Image: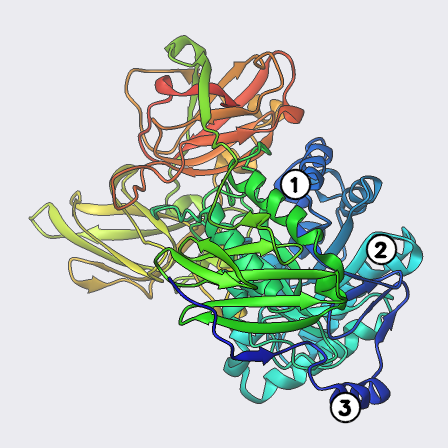
């Protein structure tokens, strides 16, 4: 039992009225049309706001899914939808833009607007986001003298051009709040503070330039920089963390509000890694604490994660993105996370008046207990009673006794009755089930095409060095062949092969026959494949297939990253600097045999009882009845890529097990909007020796 201590510490966002008057006179409230801010919160149409936001990324779902996702967010008491802008998706080739389908940013924002929610637009244009190359288009790599995210003129020219294009597109559609639209915040750059020191004297000038450039575009709404303690005025520095209530240093000016741009609802998953499961109680506790400490905007990253379609995921990241968010990969509500946070939002909103306009008093209730009390009048009061300890405690507040569970906050809208406790979940949990609808267990249902193994004589691109895969393949494929000839004169057929690679996966072929495979892991930038291989007397053709599983997405000097083979030794002899032949991508990719038209360009064969590496599999299926999400169970496969009706539904890597021996992801989402009622074309590229006869098409249910 902990008894109330009489020591009172007064803290408020205007805690020094004299200082506040000086700051107001010199700086004033920052105006952005209908959106302004001061030291307490954003001000929209003249009203201070406490806002709850949820990240939903338009290209990680389909336009047909957007309305339902936004409706469910709104039902969860979300006020704002936050999204990045994906530069490499919109400008895959310099000067050639694409805003169609899943890329239709304007349509997405208008859908949000139609449902009465606000938007935070994180333009970046570097975004990280577990998106390949951090969202930067690979063609930037080839601009002479460029250094990404630095006080570097070639990069700044391109960054400003794309940022201005997005801003002007939003203005043309009247989407900024200053025009009557839903966008209330914009973001420039992304977590630059984590790498700024790596750029030395080129870091801070870049930050100042980026802020000035963004503000100069005159969006009419405030700009933010996350994880950027030195964000120049009037740009607001914001927090990204799971615990911004304790870890955020706070705004770098008393005239700026406390904003939390990324509250991670789980964490990104990688192939071979165990999922991180964050509880609804932990999220709610940290949100309540942030609000109690004068926070006024909390964004959940992600509220809906979605799917990394095609080859969009960054290095080693699985296809399902933030599946443990309040809305799962398919847009289904995940309980109790969704419901518990909904109740939290409603409770905090009921305290809006004292929170936004009252004076805050912090009262010690014990060694690990305290009360955050907000009063705006004799009747308007709200209190947050916190127990940061690991045991239940009984505390006295305003002559009333309260029981506080460990690591929890009780919210008292009238400073008397507990309306919500972060550790007490009243929402029933639900579970997700996959029900098999179609089994592809008949060999007659499948056709196969064996990918050709090229040798040196088949290649036209040659070099006497090992080429970098990233700068050579230019993100047109995950795959690149390295081929050479080796003359074997030893009477011993067994020879040692040693390869150092900075790709993610490597397959070695000797005279067209698989001789070994190896792969790296998310924590290693390189790996070594060492095998004893069988060579024939005389000339041998050695071919290596190097595969990247997404490009890197974070860190300084991204333009310097390399992938692929770095050194090769055969029988102890270094053959790194000899004549090599190269082929970017696979023949099946070049012919687009995963499409209806491309499929006819090759000779498909009947399925045999045995499976071989580098095989394309093709079949057709009818769409399951109903509206439940559709998924492909690839638990019997190894590693590869899948397409349905020509649409890439992502990479799979079932054979890369987590430490407990399970696959990182077995089920792969097929959005219903890409399905026809009958005759859907399924094509799978399998690198290893997976068994397609055990694949099933399932539908997803929650109970």
Q: Residues within 10 Å of mark 1 (few under 14, many from 20)?
A: many
Residue at the extreme front:
399
Asked if one can make out residue 443 in the rendered structure from this viewpoint, the answer is yes
Asked if one can make out residue 94 in the rendered structure from this viewpoint, the answer is no
Please identify, in this view, whether the residue under mark 3 or under mark 1 is nearer the observer.
Answer: 3
- Quadrant housing residue 207: bottom right
Give the x, y percent position of residue 223.
75, 69
> What label sits on residue 170 in the rendered view?
2
What's the coloring here? rainbow
419 and 564: which is toward the camera? 419
- Left or right: 605 with respect to 99? left
Please identify, in this view, whether the residue under mark 2 or under mark 3 is nearer the observer.
Answer: 3
Q: Residues within 10 Å of mark 3 (few under 14, many from 20)?
A: few
Give the x, y percent position of residue 398.
57, 64
Q: Give the CA distance from mark 1 to mark 2.
A: 27 Å
In primary-sequence order, the first of circles 3 and 1 is: 3
In the image, what residue occupies the spot 44% across and 52% down? 582
Secondary structure, mark 1, is loop
Q: Is residue 353 above or below residue 515?
A: below
Give the x, y percent position of residue 634.
40, 28
In primary-sequence order, the first of circles 1 and 2 is: 1
476 and 652: which is toward the camera? 652
Q: Give the CA distance from mark 3 to mark 1.
A: 40 Å
- Left or right: 67 with respect to 656? right
In the image, what residue occupies the spot 34% across and 26% down? 636
* Pointer 1 residue: 76
> What label sits on residue 18 in the rendered view?
3
25 and 497: which is toward the camera? 25
């Amino acid at each position: 039992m902990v008894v109330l201590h009489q020591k009172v510490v007064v803290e408020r966002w205007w805690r020094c009225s004299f200082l506040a008057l000086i700051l107001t006179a010199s700086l004033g409230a920052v105006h952005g049309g209908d959106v302004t801010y001061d030291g307490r919160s954003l001000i929209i149409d003249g009203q201070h706001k406490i806002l709850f936001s949820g990240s939903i990324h338009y290209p990680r779902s389909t336009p047909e899914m957007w309305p339902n996702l936004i409706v469910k967010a709104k039902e969860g008491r979300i006020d704002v939808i936050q999204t990045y802008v994906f530069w490499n998706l919109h400008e895959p080739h310099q000067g050639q833009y694409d805003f169609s389908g899943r890329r239709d940013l304007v349509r997405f924002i208008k859908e949000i607007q139609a449902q009465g929610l606000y938007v935070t637009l994180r333009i970046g244009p570097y975004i990280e986001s577990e998106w390949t190359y951090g969202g930067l288009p690979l063609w930037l790599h080839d601009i002479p003298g460029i250094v990404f995210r630095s006080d570097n003129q070639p990069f700044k020219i391109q960054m400003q051009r794309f940022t201005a294009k997005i801003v002007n597109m939003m203005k043309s559609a009247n989407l900024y709040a200053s025009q009557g639209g839903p966008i209330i915040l914009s973001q420039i750059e992304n977590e630059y503070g984590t790498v700024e020191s790596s750029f030395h004297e080129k870091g801070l000038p870049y930050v100042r330039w980026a802020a000035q450039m963004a503000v100069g575009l005159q969006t009419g709404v405030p700009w933010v920089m996350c994880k950027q303690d030195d964000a120049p005025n009037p740009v607001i520095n914001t927090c990204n963390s799971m615990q911004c209530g304790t870890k955020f240093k706070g705004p770098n000016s008393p005239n700026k509000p406390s904003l939390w741009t990324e509250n991670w609802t789980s964490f990104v998953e990688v192939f071979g890694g165990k999922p991180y499961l964050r509880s609804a109680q932990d999220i709610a506790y940290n949100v309540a604490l942030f609000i109690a400490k004068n926070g006024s905007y909390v964004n959940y990253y992600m509220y809906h994660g979605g799917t990394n379609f095609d080859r969009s995921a960054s290095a080693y990241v699985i296809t399902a993105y933030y599946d443990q968010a309040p809305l799962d990969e398919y847009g289904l509500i995940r309980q109790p996370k969704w419901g518990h946070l909904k109740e939290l939002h409603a409770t905090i909103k009921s305290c809006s008046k004292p929170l936004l306009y009252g004076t805050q008093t912090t009262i010690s209730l014990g060694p690990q207990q305290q009360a955050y009390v907000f009063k705006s009048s004799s009747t308007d009061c709200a209190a947050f009673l916190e127990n940061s300890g690991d045991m239940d405690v009984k505390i006295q507040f305003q002559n009333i006794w309260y029981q506080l569970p460990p690591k929890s906050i009780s919210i008292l809208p009238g400073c008397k009755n507990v309306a919500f406790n972060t550790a007490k979940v009243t929402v029933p949990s639900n579970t997700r089930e996959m029900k098999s609808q179609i089994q592809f267990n008949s060999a007659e249902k499948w056709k196969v095409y064996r990918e050709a193994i090229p040798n040196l004589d088949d290649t036209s691109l040659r070099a006497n060095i090992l080429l970098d895969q990233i700068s050579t393949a230019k993100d047109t494929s995950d795959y690149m062949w390295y081929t050479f000839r080796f003359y074997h004169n030893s009477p011993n057929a067994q020879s040692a092969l040693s390869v150092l690679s900075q790709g993610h996966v490597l397959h070695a072929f000797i005279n067209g026959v698989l001789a070994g495979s190896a792969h790296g892991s998310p924590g290693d930038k390189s790996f070594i494949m060492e095998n004893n291989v069988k060579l024939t007397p005389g000339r041998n053709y050695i071919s290596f297939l190097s595969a990247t599983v997404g490009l890197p997405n974070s860190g300084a000097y991204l333009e310097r990253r390399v992938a692929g083979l770095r050194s090769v030794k055969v029988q102890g002899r270094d053959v790194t600097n000899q004549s090599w032949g190269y082929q970017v991508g696979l023949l099946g990719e070049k012919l687009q045999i995963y499409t209806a038209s491309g499929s006819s360009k090759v000779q498909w064969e009947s399925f045999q009882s045995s499976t071989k590496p580098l095989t394309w599999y093709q079949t057709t299926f009818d769409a399951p009845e109903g509206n439940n999400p559709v998924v492909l169970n690839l638990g019997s496969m190894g590693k590869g890529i899948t397409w349905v009706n020509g649409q890439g539904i992502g990479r799979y890597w079932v054979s890369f097990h987590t430490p407990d021996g399970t696959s990182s992801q077995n089920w792969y989402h097929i959005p219903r909007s890409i399905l026809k009622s009958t005759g859907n074309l399924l094509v799978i590229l399998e690198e290893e020796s997976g068994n397609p006869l055990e694949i099933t098409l399932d539908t997803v249910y929650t109970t």
